[in-house]
Image (cartoon, grey):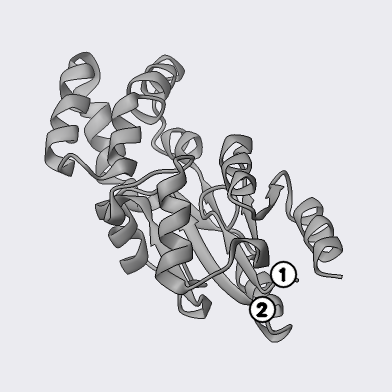
Amino acid sequence: MIKNVVFDIGNVLVDFRWRALMEDLQLPEETQKIFEKTVFGSPWWGELDHGIYEEAEILQHFREDNQDHLDAFNRVWDNRDKLVEPYAYAVQWIERLKQAGLKVYLLSNYPREIFALHTECGCFPFLEQVDGKVVSGFVKMVKPNADIYEHLLGEYGLRSEECVFIDDREENVEAARALGMKGIVFESYDQACETLNKLLV
């Protein structure tokens, strides 16, 4: 019996809108393509998620890798508070699950300082509704490694067979399934709701 719903955050409850941010800043298309590789698709962004290195150290690597576009990079970085935007359905979705008697948790790969900034900026209006959260940058573990899922289960005394995990990345969902959780690869709100409702019957 499912008692707990575990959500990823980015591209499930909030729009990770890094492309839109660069368009908002009117960066040239060529610069956007460069930053897709050297910033948002860079291994250093993964290290931000992991939380092992200090943000200042990773920021230095970003600047070294983007010397020819430093002003544009600084504009993007200075506007990182606008990197995400909550989906309109997020709060009501969690409210409905809570009203149905389910516990709701968050399990997300997210840089520590940026998560704190986005919390302060009100990007997570659902945060007070959840029963717990594990954020990679704070625990220095990342999905899809098993240890972060085990940390969530241990931290909140959850049984894996009573959990369903919703994430937009298949490898993260497969890792949850390997530990005994049910898993849903998020493609859209309607699709995820329909699949979740079937699991809850």
- In this rendering, would 93 be left or right of 120? right
Q: Amino acid at mark 2?
A: Leu
The numbered dot on residue 125 is: none
**Image mark count:** 2
Q: Is residue 145 above or below residue 101?
A: above
Assign the C terminus to one quadrant of the image: bottom right
CB-based contact (under 8 Å), mark 1 and mark 2: yes
Q: Which residue is at the front of the view, 14 or 149?
A: 149
Residue at image x 70%, y 85%? Answer: 99
The numbered dot on residue 2 is: 1
Is tag 1's residue or tag 2's residue first in the polypeptide sequence?
A: 1
Secondary element type, mark 1: loop
The numbered dot on residue 102 is: 2
- In this rendering, would 144 be left or right of 141? right
Q: Which numbered mark, 1 or 2, is in the foreground of this view? A: 1
Residue at image x 50%, y 55%? Answer: 85
Q: Amino acid at mark 1?
A: Ile
Assign the N terminus to one quadrant of the image: bottom right
- In this rendering, would 153 be left or right of 161? left
Query: Disc 1 versus disc 2: distance between alpha carbons?
Result: 8 Å
Secondary element type, mark 2: loop
Q: Which residue is at the front of the view, 82 or 24?
A: 82
Image position, residue 97 (x, y; %):
69, 76
Q: Is residue 146 above or below residue 118?
A: above
Crowding at mark 1 (Cα within 10 Å: few <14, some 14-19, many 20+): some
Image position, residue 129 (x, y; %):
52, 79
Image position, residue 26 (x, y; %):
41, 31
Residue at image x 17%, y 17%? Answer: 67
Q: Which residue is at the front of the view, 34 or 58?
A: 58
Image position, residue 138 (x, y; %):
28, 56
Crowding at mark 2 (Cα within 10 Å: few <14, some 14-19, many 20+): some
